[in-house]
Image (spheres, grey):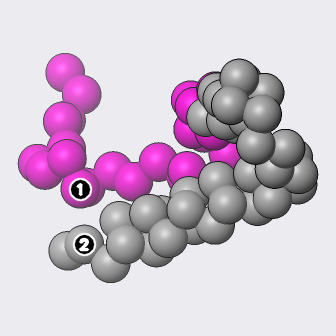
Amino acid sequence: MAKKPSAPSARKPNSDSNPTVAAMLAGVIYQARLLNRQSKLNIPEHEVISDVVDLYRVVRDELAREP
């Protein structure tokens, strides 16, 4: 029988290559595009993507700090 990790933090997935994270970020960007069109804000797409990526990096860094 295989040993199970003693704590959830015992195994850390590499979030940079995690397809779930990539899919979620793509979904957030897609929703932002739709909201931008619906509200006619005309925010440049590169600003939306930049904001989403910056937020992702902040969250990733904070999660990496946790013991």
* Residue appearing at x 13%, y 50% in the figure: 7
Name the residue rendered at 71%, 23% in the picture.
38
> Looking at the picture, how far across and down is residue 44, in whole percent?
88, 51
User: Helix or strand or loop: what does disc 2 sit on?
Assistant: loop
Quadrant of residue 27 in the image? Answer: top right
Label count reads: 2
User: Is the C-beta separation of discs 1 and 2 under 8 Å?
Assistant: yes
Q: Position of residue 41 (x, y in %)?
A: 76, 43
3 vs 11: above or below: above
Residue extent of the magenta highlight: 1-27
Q: Is residue 36 above or below residue 52?
A: above
Nearer to us: label 1 or label 2: 2
Could you tell whether 35 is left or right of 5 in the image?
right
Q: Nearer the viewer, residue 51 or 22?
A: 51
Q: Which residue is mark 2?
A: 66
Q: Position of residue 23 (x, y in %)?
A: 64, 28
Which of these two is toward me, 41 or 20?
Answer: 41
